């Protein structure tokens, strides 16, 4: 199987929450700040403010490097953890 790269832009949550999630599932940081887990590798960008009309929300780019066969399960767990609804 081939290693693929996938990028998601996560808005409305602090970068530290993303970092804590990846550490909680076994990620270890290397010298470049890349988080490395059992079947995955993740790079988190610096956070920037995204303007949505008159509202500014934090945004962070999450870049996954993962075996293609593992992507669906990793994405499902990630989305479930960061599932949110406006209100």
Image (cartoon, helix red, strand yellow):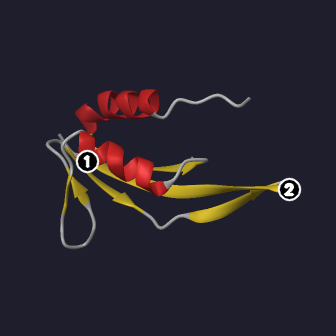
Please tell me in which quadrant of the rendered image residue 35 appears: bottom left
Give the x, y percent position of residue 11.
59, 49
* Circle 1 Cα neighbour tier, 10 Å, few/some/many (<14 / 14–19 / ≥20): some
Q: Tell me if residue 32 comes above or below residue 49 in the rendering.
A: below
> Circle 2 is placed at which residue position?
54
- Residue 71 position, x and y percent, is 31, 35
Using residue 76 as the reference point, say whether residue 31 is left or right of it. left
Q: Residue at x 51, y 53 (%)?
A: 14
Secondary structure beneath disc 2? Answer: loop
The N terminus sits in image quarter: top left
> How would you rate the neighbour count of disc 2 (Cα within 10 Å): few for under 14, some for 14-19, many for 20 or more?
few
Name the residue at the bottom extreme. Answer: 31
Q: Earlier in the sequence, mark 2 or mark 1?
A: 1
Give x and y (percent) for residue 12: 61, 47
For the residue labelled by badge 1, is the local secondary structure a helix, a strand or a loop? helix
Residue occupying the point 39% across, 27% down? 76
Image spot of residue 50 (x, y percent): 69, 60
Q: Nearer the viewer, residue 20 or 41?
A: 20
Front residue of 73/46: it is 46
């Amino acid at each position: 199987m081939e290693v693929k790269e996938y990028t998601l832009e996560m808005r409305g949550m602090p970068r530290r929450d993303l970092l804590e999630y990846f550490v909680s599932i076994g990620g270890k940081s290397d010298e470049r700040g890349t988080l490395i887990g059992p079947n995955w590798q993740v790079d988190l960008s610096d956070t920037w403010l995204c303007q949505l009309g008159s509202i500014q929300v934090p945004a962070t780019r999450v870049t996954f490097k993962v075996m293609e066969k593992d992507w669906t399960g990793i994405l499902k767990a990630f989305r479930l953890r960061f599932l949110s609804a406006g209100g």
